[in-house]
Amino acid sequence: MNIAVVGTGYVGLVSGVCFAEMGNEVTCVDIDARKVESLRDGRLTIYEPGLEVYFDRGRRENRLRFTTDLAEALAPADVVFLALPTPPAEDGSADLQYVLGVADDIGELLAAHPDWGYKVLVDKSTVPVGTARRVTAAVGAYGLEAGKHFDVVSNPEFLREGVAVDDFMKPERVVVGTDSERAAELMTRLYEPFVRSGNPILVMDEASAEMTKYAANAMLATKITFMNEVANLCDRVGADVDKVRRGIGTDSRIGPKFLYAGIGFGGSCFPKDVQALHRTAREEGYSFEILDAVLRVNDEQRKSMVPHIVDALGDNDGRLDGKTIAVWGLAFKPHTDDVREAPAHVLIREFVGLGADVVAFDPEAVETTRAAFEREPLGGTGSLSYAETAYDAAAGADALVVATEWPEFRRPDLARVRQSMAGDGAPLVFDGRNVFDPKHMAGLGFTYRSVGRPSFP
Ligand code: NAD
């Protein structure tokens, strides 16, 4: 099949590369000329495990191309994916300007080139209920007829950054939202090779497909937040959230996944999708109470370690001037360089605001962090610098914060870390991801704090 992917970010690039790997002809489009140039030159623009092999093969065998010219990709395409940003607007709703803008461009191009034939336009972006209808209207405004010249399908993406290639190649399910049999058949043919193990392709109406994506993310964000609240209570009653997690995770009605307590969720999806669903509910006159709580609790959770650090290191005014804090992990989760809404960034902003000097290390996310803080500079009187290794970050620090559970942070030489940190007493480690064993850490001479687990000493 011939495929166009419009928007070549995390979702668009992974989708394009994986469709090409299945033998399809794929052209990825982006307005960011530097991104396109880099991809054309064979340089990946995101870090995603496993992507490079397929990317190299697709390019080598000329099934995978990149362009800034929408027309070039659209002309031969049977299916056109819109993998465009849908960032939160000021009121929390999903900003559809990119999706509707491109729909408009597509309508104009198709109307001017009737010989390009029937196209299936696919909303791959996470978009509120009603967007497929709005895309249909935008294209239809050029005198094109849905069902004859084009159809619009909602095909939300469930890939997780960090394991995106695996998720895309072997999805647990594919959701296809459309009332058009012709479009459903084309989409089924496209996705069949990805679900050979028997996972379902679920064809449903557009609104249900659009809602499915938000409901999935909102459920997952709620699950994390619920466990974070359980952890906060464990702290107060002297229970251990890790034991509670195992205790409830073995119940098949609950399941073992997404039960890890920590310093809150981040990323480009959960915060914005929960907000957008909350907003959709409000627009419909419905108050989605749980989502309101999820957003509030998560905001608090991301900053929850700040008072502990101020208690331990702060001066009488609650400031951290002259203190050095090492931060391990900048990405919002391991195996990605994505730092959008990363809890580590929230903490760094707080620490620097209170006058601390932060020394950060992340195996993949330093460049994306630099770029993020260039776009939205840190205020405050403290500073942020970057270390080459996790050990360099910790050396001389008054406190160490673990903000992302990269595997390399799980078994470092902690005795070396302990010796290199500042002060003669027991240096403070705040483990926001519960990667270390509390007793072991106390035994090594740290003052160790984690989330929802007993502290020693
Ligand atoms: P992204 O910001 O990484 O990528 C979007 C790309 O679109 C950028 O490269 C941008 O330059 C490009 N773009 C913007 N306007 C354009 C235009 N007019 N023409 C062509 N390209 C244009 O975003 P993402 O993380 O890939 O997310 C895309 C969508 O997928 C969002 O709706 C998101 O919610 C959803 N989603 C993301 C994930 C994820 O893990 N990142 C997972 C599932 C769904």
Image (cartoon, grey):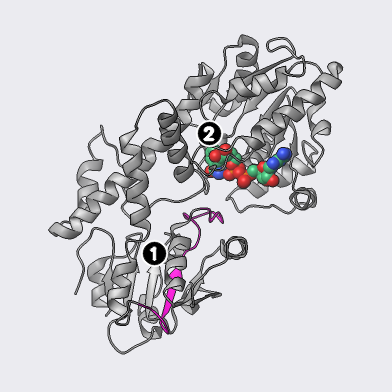
Amino acid identity at mark 2: Lys
Q: Nearer the viewer, residue 78 or 6?
A: 6
Picture quadrant of residue 431: bottom left
Q: Which numbered dot is residue 170?
A: 2
Expressed as whole percent of the image width and height from the top left, the position of residue 217 reads 43, 37
Expressed as whole percent of the image width and height from the top left, the position of residue 369 reads 57, 63
Circle 2 SS class: loop
Q: Which numbered dot is residue 410?
A: 1
* Neighbour tally class for label 2: few under 14, some 14-19, many 20 plus, Cα within 10 Å: some
Q: Residue at x 56, y 61 (%)?
A: 365
Rendered position, 169 above or below 356: above
Rendered position, 205 above or below 5: above
Q: Residue at x 20, y 49 (%)?
A: 244
Q: Residue at x 59, y 60 (%)?
A: 372
Q: Nearer the viewer, residue 197 or 417?
A: 417
Q: Which residues are magenta?
A: 319-340
Give the left or right position of residue 316, taking residue 386 as reference: left
Give the left or right position of residue 68, taking residue 175 as reference: right
Amino acid identity at mark 1: Arg
Quarter occupied by the N terminus: top right
